[in-house]
Image (cartoon, rainbow, N blue to C red):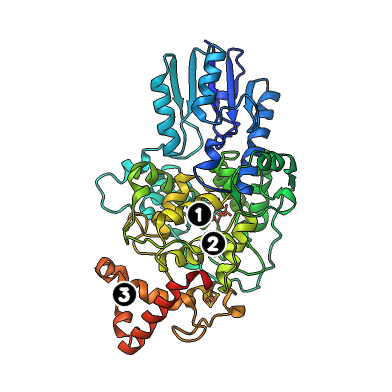
Amino acid sequence: KKTLRLILGDQLNTNHSWFRETKPETVYVLMEMMQEQTYVKHHIQKILAFFAAMRNFAYQLQKAGHEVIYLKLNDRENEQTLTGNLQKIIDKRSIQQFEYLLPDEYRLDQQLKSFCKSLNIQTKAYDTEHFFTSREEVGDFFSGKKQLIMESFYRHMRQKHDLLMNGNEPVGGLWNYDPDNRNRYDSKVPLPESLSFNHDLGEIKKMIDAMQVPYFGNVEAKKVALPLSRKEGLKLIDYFCQNLLPHFGTYEDAMLQEHASLFHSRLSFALNVKLISPKEVVNQAISYWQYNQKQISLPQIEGFVRQILGWREYMRGLYWNKMPEFAEKNFFNHQAKLPEWFWTGETKMNCLKHCIGQSLNLAWAHHIQRLMVIGNFALLSGSNPDEVDAWYLGVYIDAMQWVQLPNTRGMSQFADGGIVGTKPYVASAAYINKMSNYCGSCFYDKNKKYGEKACPYNSLYWDFFFRNEHLLADNQRLKLIYGNLHRLKPEDLEKILEQAETYKKQVDEL
Ligand code: FAD
Ligand code: SF4
């Protein structure tokens, strides 16, 4: 049967069983399309990275003997929508069967399902063979439970996949070494160089500009430094194991003005477009650790495995369990616009200047920068989660909705009212100062809650808890904070709240 097989831009898995043999009656299609450039405004490096990775993947498939249709954004034939292009190919080539890989995004899943219904040929959907879990597995695991605690799912995954296990017990006796992994960078070990891949994407950039694709962010000399092929992805895994894993856990939460990525792997783009698989990353890291236990302590590898086997799979499962309602949640009914400087990085707050500036320059920031600097400020200042989502989904090179949304709306903005996190991730300057060297050279004074040059995080922090007391006071994990709030002198509290009000009104000038 003449069969058309669709490969979406984030389904670049060469090891998929589809590609095990070449079949003359099967044709694959990959397409660059305006539809995917306009549902949110993307960072230019994200668009470049996707197109370059897709083009390379199509080339590799062709080299392996498969028939591939590749639609470039500026092809005259391009209808610019998924279903428009598919329908055209199906008609033109008299296709008898249409097959696709299950999309990771709800919107595309719906679009493909309804497209299949409209067809009068056979259709079939296949698993992407990428994740440890199926779409439903996390939902099934938590079925009937009120709270979806990541830690219990993670322990189940360790047992199920026999990773870092000693029979039924976790290696080393503990499941979680998080308490060991919260250090400020202390210069005890040299900072690693980050491994950069220098693709010149000038041609693609030219096409994007000629087609007037909307975008934001910067791209230095038309270059994207992350792996865009499987070969490069594998190189980065090796580099990570040898150079970064030995200190990954220790400095996982640390931030440094002079070094964007510290000991983070920067594997997220390659993982999310499926150039590499979470199983190979986890297995390779564990086996590297096993042979190098003298240099690499258990908390390093446990911390890393938890991110991929735990958080990544958990977020995905939660997405499928809670969509589409999750995308509408706004627990605090926050309505403020994001400050203008989210698009320029031009703020006097040094931590935000660096974290946002870095996001605009690299289309990448690490977890604590996303959570405890940028997301923290967005939440404390009452930003509308729709705006926050759109920014995160656009700016990060690894942002696909299945992972961005639960992280942003759930973990970071607590807009789900406590499904992902058990309490809001907010902090004042004390935390940012503890984990980074941003405060030392800041215009604002990290120690002041109000008055001239008082750090905005401090007043906004207390203002947040004060105005949301009716929603948060019953949360056991916040008892201590509410105790502290109630112990503030009334005249101090008044000044703090006034200061927060002023800052919220002038947020663009901060
Ligand atoms: P490392 O620190 O080296 O971690 C290794 C891998 O673990 C990552 O590549 C990633 O695949 C996985 N991982 C770690 N933390 C998480 C997590 N919380 N959820 C899912 N996977 C995780 N990650 C994305 O891939 N896409 C996003 O759009 C995204 N948006 C985020 C938004 C917010 C507000 C927050 C707080 C986090 C977000 N994350 C997102 C998670 C995390 O910040 C990134 O995965 C990480 O920074 C990518 O860099 P890395 O590959 O060096 O990660
Ligand atoms: Fe950020 Fe406040 Fe520290 Fe400045 S003083 S870097 S605004 S936390």
Q: Residue at x 60, y 71 (%)?
A: 185
* Observer able to see residue 294: no
Q: Where does residue 494 sit, x and y in percent of width and height? A: 34, 84
Q: Residues within 10 Å of mark 1 (few under 14, many from 20)?
A: some
- Is disc 1 in contact with disc 2, using a CB cutoff of under 8 Å? yes
- Is disc 2 in contact with disc 3, using a CB cutoff of under 8 Å? no
The image's mark for residue 175 is: none
Q: Where does residue 107 sit, x and y in percent of width and height? A: 43, 37
* Observer able to see residue 26: yes
Q: What residue sits right under mark 3 in the picture? A: 466
Mark 2 or mark 3: which comes first in sequence?
2
* Residue closer to the observer: 305 or 375: 375
Q: What residue sits right under mark 1 in the picture? A: 391
Identified by mark 3, the residue type is Phe
Q: Residue at x 39, y 55 (%)?
A: 410
Element at label 3: helix
